[in-house]
Amino acid sequence: MRHTLPQNPQFYVTAPQDCPYLDNQVERKLFTALYGTNTRRLNNSLSKQGFRRSQNVLYRPSCANCNACMSARISSRDFEPSKSQKRILSKNSDILRAVNPALATDAQYDLFKKYITARHPNGGMSDMDADDFTAMIEETNVESKLIEYYAKKSGELELISFSLVDILDDGISMVYSVFNPDFKEKSLGTYMILDHNMLAIEMNLQYVYLGYWVKGSSKMDYKKRFSSLEVFTNDKWVCVSKSKITNVNTHKLDQQKHGMPIYLPSEE
């Protein structure tokens, strides 16, 4: 029997599970699959509404009792680096950037395992093998790229960090980033965001999408150090300093979270 896919995206909500960012909280995600001929427009549209991509799935938080987890982006044209960020750019002036197709390599996987072991040994990616890693990089039906960074070591170029990104119609979405934890003095995590911001300007794009920012989570605290940071809350993007974050458990809020509108792109 032949089954036909539905014409419009179907949305689902995950079962509650422990929140990875805040203690004594649970999380749920609203998600839909990316398929068909409209995937680029769907990724563009939903990314502007706080969704993130993981392989061929788009998702955003849909938690009943908390709205602390918000999609964040930098307005590239308005961004002004701080003094410390200017120093990071200066001390990494020898790093070389390469923009490549979303194809996995052994060097990337080796760096990924080193990064996970040092920074997230108990996380959900700690048991990913080479096939899982390849799927994370290559299973994409939108415009994705690998931004790789190299430093010279003993006369040869060494891969020290990379970022899997989606190229949206208004910006660069940083899907997943990895850096060599041995290069602490280079502040590679911050440097990559700064350089992606410069890349967005070079590509005449307005935003760099950073994933989620969670107030009160030490894992996410670094994102608020970037000027012109915006977050998606109450169905719109606002400056992070103007966002309102609450942690209340009411049936009314539950209805509001699941009732937030989703705007789909046209098929044309």
Image (cartoon, rainbow, N blue to C red):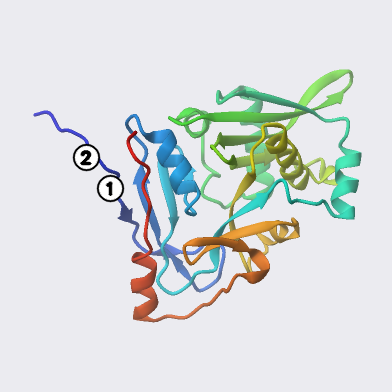
Residue labelled with disc 1: 10
Q: Locate residue 2, reporting x and y percent.
A: 12, 28
Quadrant into which the N terminus falls: top left
The amino acid type, in three-letter code, at marker 1 is Gln
112 lies left or right of 3: right
Residue under the image location 91 percent in, 40 percent down: 91
Helix, strand or loop at mark 1: loop
Helix, strand or loop at mark 2: loop
The amino acid type, in three-letter code, at marker 2 is Pro
Q: Name the residue nearer the viewer: 234 or 58.
A: 234
Q: Are marks 1 and 2 in contact (CB under 8 Å)?
A: yes
Q: Is residue 231 above or below residue 194?
A: below
Residue labelled with disc 2: 6
Q: Can the viewer see residue 20 in this picture?
A: no
Q: Can the viewer see residue 237 in this picture?
A: yes
Residue under the image location 85 percent in, 55 percent down: 82
Residue under the image location 45 percent in, 41 percent down: 43
Q: Name the residue nearer the viewer: 149 or 77.
A: 77
